[in-house]
Amino acid sequence: MAKESGIGMTLNVDGSDASADTITDDVTNLSMSTTRNLQDVTGLADTTVERLPLLADGSVTINGVFNDGLSHSTFRDVATSTVARTVAAAHSGQTLTEEIYFTDYALTRAQDGSLTWSAPGQLANSTSFGWS
């Protein structure tokens, strides 16, 4: 498998109505994390660390440029909606799908006049996730 850039990635995010919105062209960058907690179970007589894998977790932070007709309509009700939203990032035949509770939709109007947004979220209750 060859090294690749991220050019050509697509991103779909559900609005609160559970319909998938393709917001790829509004997104400038994103970070998706799939982590696993570990428990240190090292005994007193051990000379190296011993660990057990525990619960998995996921998170996402999506950043973009304001678009009233697309990304803003997807995220505008984050503060008043309590639904999990499907986030699917696809690249090179691989798709990472997570059910996410978005925790913020922050708009920034910079001194130069640009209007951008950031939407961080955490994995929803006991939902499975992963690359396919």
Image (cartoon, rainbow, N blue to C red):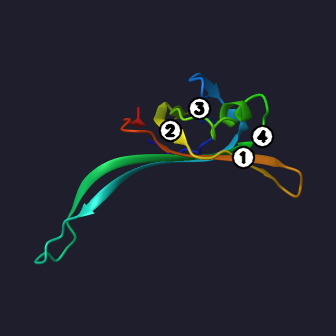
Q: What is the x, y in percent for residue 110?
A: 83, 55
Is 92 on the left or on the right of 111, as rendered? left
Residue tagged by mark 3? 13
Could you tell which of marks 4 and 3 lies nearer the N-terminus? 3
Q: Could you say where residue 85 lies in the image, as x and y percent from the top left?
A: 53, 32
Which numbered disc flags the more N-terminal residue, 3 or 2?
A: 3
How many dots with numbers? 4
Do tag 2 and tag 4 residues touch (Cβ < 8 Å)? no
Q: Is residue 71 left or right of residue 89?
A: right
Q: Position of residue 58 (x, y in %)?
A: 44, 46
Q: Secondary structure at mark 2?
A: strand
Q: Which residue is mark 4?
A: 66
Secondary structure, mark 4, is loop
Q: CA distance from mark 1 to mark 2?
A: 17 Å
Q: CA distance from mark 4 to mark 1?
A: 6 Å
Q: Which residue is mark 1?
A: 117
**Who comes first in sequence, dot 1 or dot 2?**
2
Asked whether the beta carbons under mark 4 and mark 1 sit within 8 Å of each other, the answer is yes
Q: Residue 42 lies in what quarter of the image?
A: bottom left
Mark 1 secondary-structure assignment: strand
Say which residue label 2 marks. Answer: 100
Residue at mark 3 to residue at mark 1: CA–CA distance: 15 Å
